[in-house]
Amino acid sequence: MEPLLSGRIKTLSTSQTIAMSERAAELKAQGVDVISLSLGEPDFDTPSYIVDAARQAMEEKFFKYPPIVGYKDLREAIVRKLKRDNRIDYDVNQIVVSTGSKQSIFNAAMVLVSPGDEVILPSPYWVSYFEIAKLVGGIPVPVKTTIDNDFKITPQQLEAAITPRTKLMIFNTPSNPSGSVYSKEELSALAKVLQKHPRVYVISDEIYEYINFTGNFAGFAEIPEIKDRVITVNGVSKAFAMTGWRIGYMAAHPTIAKACAKIQSQVTSGANSIAQRATIAALDGGKQKIQYMIDAFDQRRQLVYNLLKEIPGFKVNMPTGAFYFFPDVSAFFGKTFNGTTINNATDLSMYLLEEAKVATVTGEAFGNPECLRFSYATSQDELKEAFARVKKVLQF
């Protein structure tokens, strides 16, 4: 007899970024030479000074259950980081450390959103935002942006999207998948709208904060008028090449932080003890110690921009953060290549995988079905080869 699963799991979609990565891995296991530009994972190793801190933690026998909210000295390091880099003052009781920033986002959505509440998602959005909103009983409300405006939501769009049922907006800067970075002025304009709607909260996902080529970074919580309604989420996965260490954190109003700790206590308890100790070294080291990675990403960004511009049919802008390009590929829709008709971005993504052996992610996963996401978190040689293959199989 087939197991009777809940309605909740039946309506939940699988992450298309992970699905494409798994499909690429399957082909590689079969001996197929696939270049994966699908997964947002730095190709660098975790820096040695962070690994050394983990080794020291093992020698000091940090083997017991850690506190639910994270070690106090780690939360103090997070407070220092937020003061130093973001000009925001928090107390340690406003910090909750979780098993990756995805858990931080889920925790916050879980404690804020009641069934039937609306969750605004500027589109393109990270794939998990939509499913998390559904999972906690919310109604996702995508707000479409386009490449012509660098994929940024305007104050007018935000105002139009807010209804009496709106409870939350999940916001990402720098953005995955578009690479867009909001300026302080742009955030302030959005904050003026939010000031008129005191029931609406914001989860500000800033996981790509350091991978930012504008020279400046601003977060929603810097705006005093709405700080208490902002849940700042960050982590060490992207900037410090620590994806497998699984450490994220949030900074929020004490009542929200306490509620998130309550949820976490019944789900995962505290995050990995050794990884927490390593994270102290990462955060105290700051951006300057991983500048070499940021510089490498910037060089790759310039390279990929030029490579994409050489392929007719791609409408591309220059992203200013993260490590993705999100070109509009609608010019290919209705075209036939090597006997395959491209009807949408999903068709194009599969075509590139099968014919060029290059893995990408369809924009449909991010709420912009006319786009395709390319990750450039890999070497310049692989990027050159990947886009040479793409260009070859997309000749008009």
Image: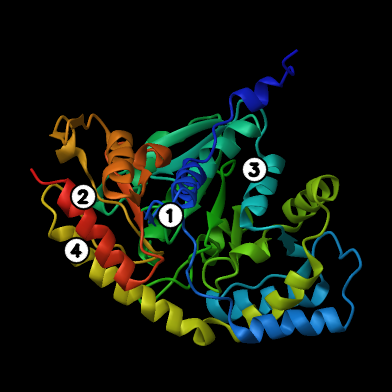
Q: Are marks 3 and 1 in contact (CB under 8 Å)?
A: no
Gap between marks 4 and 2, in whole Å?
20 Å
| Residue 52 place in picture, x, y as percent | 70, 85
Estimate the x, y position of residue 13 in percent, counting from the top left. 54, 32
Residue at 62% across, 23% down:
10
Q: Residues within 10 Å of mark 4 (few under 14, many from 20)?
A: some
CA–CA distance in space, label 3 to label 4: 39 Å
Q: Is residue 123 left or right of residue 99?
A: left
Name the residue beneath numbered marker 2: 148
Give the residue at mark 4: 307
- Give the class, few, some or many, for how many residues have Cα within 10 Å of label 1's Cα (few <14, many ≥20): many
Residue at 55% over, 76% down: 45
Q: Nearer the viewer, mark 4 or mark 2?
A: 4
Q: Earlier in the sequence, mark 3 or mark 4?
A: 3
Residue 171 visible in the displayed image: yes
Q: Earlier in the sequence, mark 1 or mark 4?
A: 1
* SS state under label 3: helix
Of badges 3 and 1, the one in the foreground is: 1
